[in-house]
Amino acid sequence: MTKLVSLKEAISKFVSDGDVVYAAGFTHLIPFAAGHEIIRQGKKNLTLARATPDLIYDQMVAAGCAKKVIFSYMGNPGVGSLRIVRAAIEKGELEWEEYSHFGMITRLQAGASGLPFLPMNQTGATDLEKSNPLIKRVTDPYSGKEVITVPALNPDVAIVHVQRADKNGNAHLWGIVGEQKEVAFAAKKVILTAEEIVDEAVIRSDPNRTLIPGFIVSAVCHEPHSAHPSYAQGYYDRDNEFYLGWDKLSESVETVKQYLDEWVYGVKDRAEYWQKLGAEKHEKLKVTKRMSEPVDYGNY
């Protein structure tokens, strides 16, 4: 029994037009390859949810995949605005729903816990209540004080990229950990992409690193370099040049179209994309080994 399939097959089978799709990862392990496959397959009317809509959602909105974005903070990290998403919102072409970072993660925690909503302490982002009627206040029955509440978020599909997984979807993830665990448990279906597919014994050798258990995973895809231009700790570095370049490129509808034609529609998969990047870029993104200290789990 195996859940190993191609990424093309996983997207075709588990992502449908009109779905709520959550591509997880906070600056790290962002599933760009899956986003590109969604674009290639022409998926439409998606609601794209993400705590921090990275360039992948700029690209998916530019390709006409989305009808709505649900987010907390939106931007090209360290550079500026997501020009395409922002322009679409300002023109009224894209629906939107905004939360604080903590509000977004609380929504996922509620969804993962099977609860309809969760309370949270008031944050500094009180103006969000004026623009988002789903953020409500209730009285704490214990103290009598007001607390903020946000509704559960249960995406139709969560897409999570990890460093390694076995064929059944038990996955190891390390480095910066975002909301991957919460969204995987909150979602109805989970597509996992992995830098490596390893034997189950490798996963069992370090159980505390298993953030995603196989029993919640729908499909496992072996997709090295899936996170570029973001990074995968221990595998390749962040492509800062790409993020800076996208800021300029995304000023023009025409140059964005040219990018999609060449780098998304013009390649059949992530392997071809990576080869197209070329040896010089591969070399720039190489990382040197920096091993953690071993952990002794003992013998029985």
Image (cartoon, grey):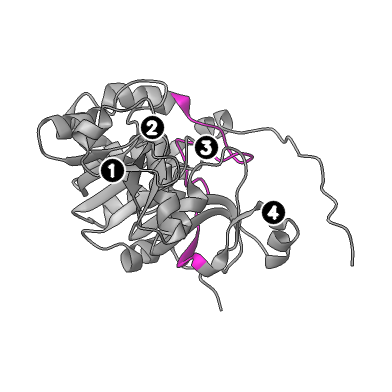
Q: Which residue is mark 2?
A: 122
- Left/right of residue 11 with respect to residue 238 in the rendered view: left
Q: Quadrant of residue 43?
A: bottom left
- Determine the main secondary structure of the stretch shown in magenta: loop
Q: Which residue is mark 3?
A: 231
Disc sitting over residue 244 in the figure? none
The three-letter code of the residue at mark 3 reads Tyr
Disc sitting over residue 70 in the figure? 1
Q: Which residues are magenta?
A: 216-240
The three-letter code of the residue at mark 4 reads Asn
- Left/right of residue 51 with respect to residue 170 in the rendered view: left
Helix, strand or loop status at disc 4: helix
Of badges 3 and 2, nearer the viewer stands: 2
Residue 300's spot in the image, x, y percent? 89, 67
**Residues marked 3 and 4 touching at CB (< 8 Å):** no
Of badges 3 and 1, nearer the viewer stands: 1
Spatial separation of the CA atoms under disc 3 and disc 4: 22 Å
N-terminal label among 3 and 2: 2
N-terminal label among 3 and 1: 1
Q: Which residue is mark 4?
A: 208
Residue 72's spot in the image, x, y percent? 34, 35
The reply to whether residue 267 is visible in this rendering is no
Helix, strand or loop status at disc 1: strand
Q: Is residue 161 magenta?
A: no
Q: Quadrant of residue 198?
A: bottom right
